[in-house]
Amino acid sequence: EVHIQESGGGSVQAGGSRRLSCEFSLTDDYIPCMAWFRQVPGKEREGVASLDRAGAPMYPDSLKGRYSISRDNARKTLYLQMNSLKSDDTAMYYCAAYSQNGCPTLLRSDYLRWGRGTQVTVSS
């Protein structure tokens, strides 16, 4: 049984930082490709960070330098560190696992398993 659970969301002031966590339990000890996405109502879900099995990250150009993805394999937890937050970062953030089309990848359609999300609200 695959279980993915995000946490760490909440309200934060613009300019502040937030770290999200994604605890995962998978069908075996295989560490898959994983990623963070975000979505606001009325817009497509967009990839914000991906991490391959070796720990190599990928970010969209717009977020490089502000977002950082990491993983603790022993704790089976994926993290997303977000710095210098802006109101545009307000969104529901989702953790995803198991890419079916290469890794790292920021394409929503590549991922097979998803958490339910955690809301981040940035106030100015």
Image (cartoon, rainbow, N blue to C red):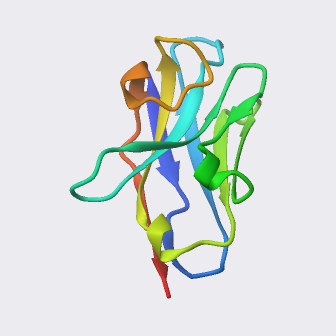
33 or 42: nearer the viewer: 42
Front-lying residue, 92 or 42? 42
* Relative vertical location of residue 92 with respect to residue 25 in this rendering, above or below: below
Q: Is residue 25 above or below residue 14?
A: above
Q: Position of residue 116 (x, y in %)?
A: 36, 45
The correct choice, above or below, for 66 with respect to 10 in the image is above
Place residue 1 in its image quadrant: top left
Which corner quadrant of the image does residue 33 belong to? top right
Is 30 positioned to the left or the right of 40 in the image?
A: right
In percent of the image, x 60 and y 72: which residue is there?
85
Q: In this view of the protein, which residue sits in the foreground, 43 or 91?
A: 43
Quadrant in the rendering for residue 46:
top left
Q: Is residue 57 above or below residue 63?
A: above
Q: For this view, does 114 lie left or right of residue 17?
A: left
Q: How many marks?
A: 0
Residue 74 place in picture, x, y as percent: 77, 30
For the point 46% across and 11% down, the residue is 100
- Residue, far front: 61
x then y, percent, for residue 58 = 67, 35
Residue at image coords 58%, 29%: 34
Residue at the extreme left: 42
Q: Could you tell me residue 72's position as x and y percent? A: 75, 36
Residue drawn at x 78%, y 20% is: 54
Q: Is residue 74 left or right of residue 101?
A: right
